[in-house]
Amino acid sequence: PPTSPTPPPHRDRPSNGSGTTATPDRPPPIKPASRQQSSGVDAQLHRSKRQEDSKIKMLLLGAGESGKSTVFKQMRLLYGAERTDEDLRMYGVVVRSNTIVAIRKLCSLLRNLELEEELEREEEGVKEAYDDLMAYLVDKTAFRTAAQDDPAVVARRKKDWVGQSPRAGLAANNDAKQFLAHHESIRILWQSNTMKQVWAKRSAVNIIDSHKEYLNDIPRISSPEFKPTTQDVLIARSRTTQVVMEKYRIDGIDFEMYDVGGQRSERRKWIDCFDGVTAVIFVAAISEYDQKMAEAKRTNRLVDALELFRSV
């Protein structure tokens, strides 16, 4: 007679540790602790998404030197954290550097306007101050002054509150040193009648109008006790070369504001900032109606701003 097949040997099915046996057709039940942990993660993700959706993201756009960073700094002044001493030292270097950049452009413009003979009819010391600045700042035919090695000057520099700031950059720190070495010549030349004529033509060399405040206050800025004021910080010009973000909380609402560089070489970075943006604030400087771009000498700055706005 045919024999019946031998049944397979009995194998213990794996237990899931909860007292029940898992089968291939039925997954093991989720432990209560794992379910609670998963629910916690889901709730956290939901809260994070709700906070992100309620956040207002603002993007500052505009051409270079249009005032975007000034608006950015004003927002921090109104709603953000106070400036640290490290921040203020950085701006102190920038203020002195901005003053050097302005007087360097004015000296070059004075020569281009052929007004050097007018300096001969000025008070004593004006022509000497102009020659000093031209030699050290514009033509750079001289590289060191005797005053820089004077022990009193060296001691004063050591007591200077601003000092040097790596955050300001090498060029700005070098300009700040030049300012301390030649601040008296800058003061004398700026107060001359000839320089008033040159200032009226400042649009030819794209000098920032507000930096007149620095030129009017040379003794304070050159003082070892100089500490930048809020106004000094607001009008300080430092080129933006990366995307900068600040967070604020206004009336219970979270804000994020982004500042970007406005020069043509920086505009390719803008596209990365549009994701999730709530509003775009486009800044244009109407005072630039008679100025040319630094990147394109034949292009009017205000015309460039209008074309940029249309493209945005």
Image (cartoon, rainbow, N blue to C red):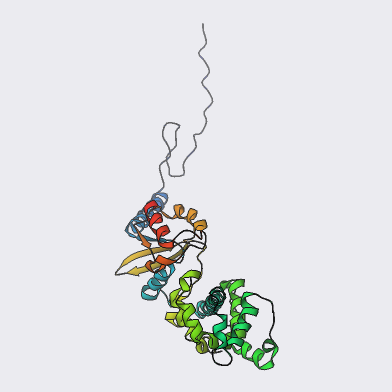
Residue nearest the observer in this picture, 183 or 247: 183
The reply, left or right, for residue 248 in relation to residue 212 is left
Q: Residue at x 43, y 55 (%)?
A: 273
Would you place residue 248 above or below residue 49 in this image?
below
Kindly indicate the quadrant of the structure image that contains residue 60: bottom left
Q: Residue furthest top?
A: 1
Can residue 249 be seen here?
Answer: yes
Q: How far from the left and from the top, in percent, is residue 134?
A: 62, 79
Q: How far from the left and from the top, in percent, is residue 252?
A: 30, 68
Q: How far from the left and from the top, in percent, is residue 165?
A: 58, 76
Residue nearest the observer in this picture, 136 or 171: 136
Can residue 66 be seen here?
Answer: no
Q: Residue at x 39, y 75 (%)?
A: 77
Residue nearest the observer in this picture, 129 or 282: 129
Report how many numbered discs are placed on residues in the image.
Answer: 0
Q: Residue furthest left?
A: 251
The reply, left or right, for residue 200 in relation to residue 166 is left
Q: Residue at x 69, y 91 (%)?
A: 150
The reply, left or right, for residue 218 in relation to residue 77 is right
Q: How far from the left and from the top, in percent, is residue 189?
A: 54, 85
Q: Residue at x 68, y 85 (%)?
A: 145
Residue nearest the observer in this picture, 135 or 279: 135
